[in-house]
């Protein structure tokens, strides 16, 4: 049984697309993960280095499952996967930023703050400078910082 025998004709067409990147956009339960998994396995089976392949999905759980499925497919076919990049968009960007951090003037161990972390940091900063006025809320200050970043403004 070949690697692609388990796919329906439309899935097989997506897996075998020969030129450039492929965007798989479809509804829930339609086989997106299956198509991406088989495409990654097929590319590796055709000689593409695993570490030259990027597959992006929405959740860490889905990324882990997809990577495991690729490894299982290749193992069943007697092939080695290398290390394809299967991750969420955020994980991929963080990994890439850490890899290239020194080129950007950053340390590789920089921290990424989520909304709660950002709010806590602004509250702490306001307390430290005695800026606990009612007219400047931590949320409004975060909005101003976000606006400045979106405009590409440098800190004063």
Image (cartoon, rainbow, N blue to C red):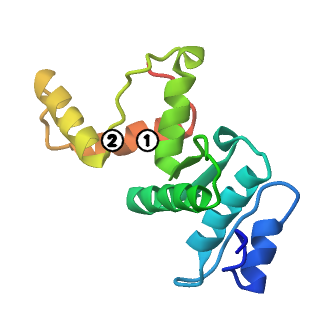
Q: Position of residue 37 (x, y in %)?
A: 61, 64
Q: Quadrant of the C terminus?
A: top left
| Local crowd size for mark 2, using a 10 Å CA cut-off: few (<14), some (14–19), many (≥20) | some
| Local crowd size for mark 1, using a 10 Å CA cut-off: few (<14), some (14–19), many (≥20) | few
Locate residue 109 relative to residue 104 in the image: left or right.
left
Locate residue 71 relative to residue 113 in the image: left or right.
right
Seen in the picture, residue 57 relative to 98 is either above or below; the reply is below
- For residue 41, what is the image quadrant? bottom right
Task: Report the residue marked by disc 2.
Answer: 142
Q: Quadrant of the N terminus?
A: bottom right
Whether tag 1 and tag 2 are in contact, CB under 8 A, the answer is: yes
* Residue 153 in view of the camera: no
| Residue depicted at x 57% and y 41% | 83
Task: Report the residue marked by disc 1.
Answer: 146
Locate residue 93 relative to residue 54 in the image: left or right.
left
| Residue depicted at x 49% and y 27% | 98
- For residue 118, what is the image quadrant? top left
Q: State the mark number for residue 131.
A: none
């Amino acid at each position: 049984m070949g690697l692609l025998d388990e796919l329906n004709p439309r899935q097989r067409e997506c897996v075998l697309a020969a030129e450039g990147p492929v965007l798989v956009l479809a509804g829930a339960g339609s086989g997106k993960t299956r198509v991406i998994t088989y495409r990654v396995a097929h590319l590796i089976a055709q000689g593409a280095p695993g570490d030259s392949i990027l597959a992006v999905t929405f959740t860490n759980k889905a990324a882990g499952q997809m990577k495991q499925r690729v490894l299982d497919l290749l193992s069943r076919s007697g092939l080695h996967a290398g290390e394809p990049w299967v991750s969420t968009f955020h994980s991929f960007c963080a990994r890439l930023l850490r890899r290239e951090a020194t080129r950007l003037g950053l340390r590789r161990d920089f921290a990424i703050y989520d909304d709660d972390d950002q709010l806590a940091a602004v509250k702490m900063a306001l307390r430290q400078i005695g800026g606990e006025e009612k007219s400047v809320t931590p949320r409004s200050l975060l909005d101003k910082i976000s606006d400045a970043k979106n405009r590409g403004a440098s800190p004063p």
